[in-house]
Amino acid sequence: MFKKFDEKEHVSGVTSIKSSVQRSLKASLIQQMPFLADYIDEILPKKEWKLVKCADHIEALAAREGEVVFFKQRDGQFYPSLKLVHKYPFILPEMRVDKGAIKFILSGANIMSPGLTNRAAGAKMTKVDSGTIVAVTAAGKQHALAVGLTKMSSEDIETQNKGIAVENIHYLNDGLWLMRNIK
């Protein structure tokens, strides 16, 4: 989604968000990610929300100092930015890959099942259903490498042990990660 994203070319407009719209967005974010409930006012303080419209029907929510904290494509669900996941690592379930998968994830590749099932190399999965937003971490690393969407439940990943397990949505050093704060 953000592999070749360049803010100068792809950001088409920035607008402030009305308080009535802020309330509905806040409710939908909490419904999607229940762990946000206690921290949503800290992440998105009142009257400081901005909507950033980008190419390919991508919309991003920026908070104080214009840092992008959530994004979505078309009418899809909101995803937290990786910078937000680094500040609040507990807001998403964790899927830990072995060290061999790091270079592929950082180049935008999806996370394959064998990278999540190799327990001897430090891989670990949280029990989740298909279609869950997850933070992808790596064995021996402190912070998340990517934010992804599970394509299979953790049980299916374990039993099948082949195919794409997690779709890589946003990763370190992609266009969104490198995007400067919105003014």
Image (tube, grey):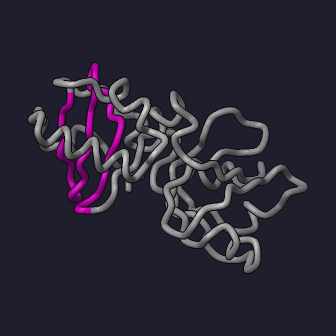
Residue 51 in picture, x, y percent from top left: 18, 39
Task: Tell me where the magenta segment starts and ends, as one range.
Answer: 49-75
Point out the residue furthest to the bottom here.
160
- Answer whether residue 24 is magenta in the image: no
- Residue 15 can be seen, yes or no: no
Splitting the image into 4 quarters, where does residue 7 fall? top left
**Which of the image's four quarters has the N terminus?**
bottom left
49 lies left or right of 29: left
Residue appearing at x 83%, y 61% in the figure: 118
**Residue 19 drawn above or below residue 66:** below
| Residue 53 part of the magenta-drawn span | yes
Height in image: 158 above or below 71?
below
Depth check: give the residue in front, 57 or 42. Answer: 42
Which residue is pictured at 51% across the width and 40% down the height? 91
Viewer can see residue 23: yes
Check the image and name the residue furthest to the top.
65
Q: Residue, x 28% and y 45% (percent of image)? A: 27
Q: Position of residue 167 (x, y in %)?
A: 52, 63
